[in-house]
Image (cartoon, rainbow, N blue to C red):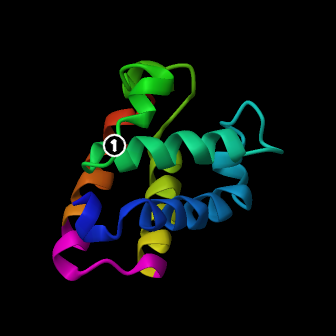
Amino acid sequence: MYEAAGGMPFFETLVDRFYDGVAADPVLLSLYPEPEDLSNARHRLTLFLAQYWGGPSTYSEERGHPRLRMRHAPFAIGPEQRDHWIGHMTDALDVVAPTPELRARFDAYFAFAAESMRNQD
C-alpha cells in the first residue's frame, strides 16, 4: 500500500491536508497539548501512517510501539471528536486522490481507527 499510494510524499501531503483542517477546528484543536504548533503531531502521524501501510519503520524507531489507545487515553474523544477527525481525513483523502481501490482501504481503516480511539459516549 505504501508504494502503491505514492510513498512518503503521499503520506506527507495527506497529513498536511488533514492538519490544515484540524488547525481550523476548535473541537479537535482543543485536544492538542500545543495547539499553536502542530508540527510534532504532523510528524508523528506521517511516520505512523507510512509505517502502518508498509513504509519505513521510523515511527517505531523514534517512539516505540504505537499503542494508539494508550497514547490517546488522556484525551476525551467522543462521537463529535471522532466525526470531526473522520471529516478532516476524508477531506484530505479527497485532495490526495488515491485510486478507488486504495481509497476504499484507507476509508475502512480510518473509520475503524477513529472509532477505536473513542473513549467517551
Q: Locate residue 97 relative to residue 9 in the image: left or right.
A: left
Tell me which segment is drawn in magenta. Answer: 95-104
Q: Quadrant of the N terminus?
A: bottom left
Q: How many marks?
A: 1
Q: Position of residue 107 (x, y in %)?
A: 28, 63
At x 29%, y 43%, the residue is 52
Q: 61 or 14, which is in the foreground?
A: 61
Q: Residues within 10 Å of mark 1 (few under 14, many from 20)?
A: some
Secondary structure under badge 1?
A: helix
Q: Locate residue 1 relative to residue 48 in the image: left or right.
A: left
Q: Is residue 30 magenta?
A: no
Q: Position of residue 29 (x, y in %)?
A: 70, 46
Q: Locate residue 16 relative to residue 91 in the image: left or right.
A: right
At x 34%, y 43%, the residue is 51
Give the amino acid type for the residue marked by disc 1 in the picture.
Gln
The reply to whether residue 121 is visible in this rendering is: no
Q: Position of residue 86 (x, y in %)?
A: 43, 58
Point out the residue furthest to the right here. 36
Q: 63 or 56, which is in the foreground?
A: 56
At x 38%, y 26%, the residue is 66
Q: Quadrant of residue 116?
A: top left
Q: Main secondary structure of the magenta part?
A: helix
Q: Is residue 100 magenta?
A: yes
In the rendered view, would you say 109 is above or below 118? below
At x 42%, y 18%, the residue is 70
Q: Position of residue 17 (x, y in %)?
A: 58, 67
Q: Return the residue at label 1.
A: 51
The reply to whether residue 57 is visible in this rendering is: yes
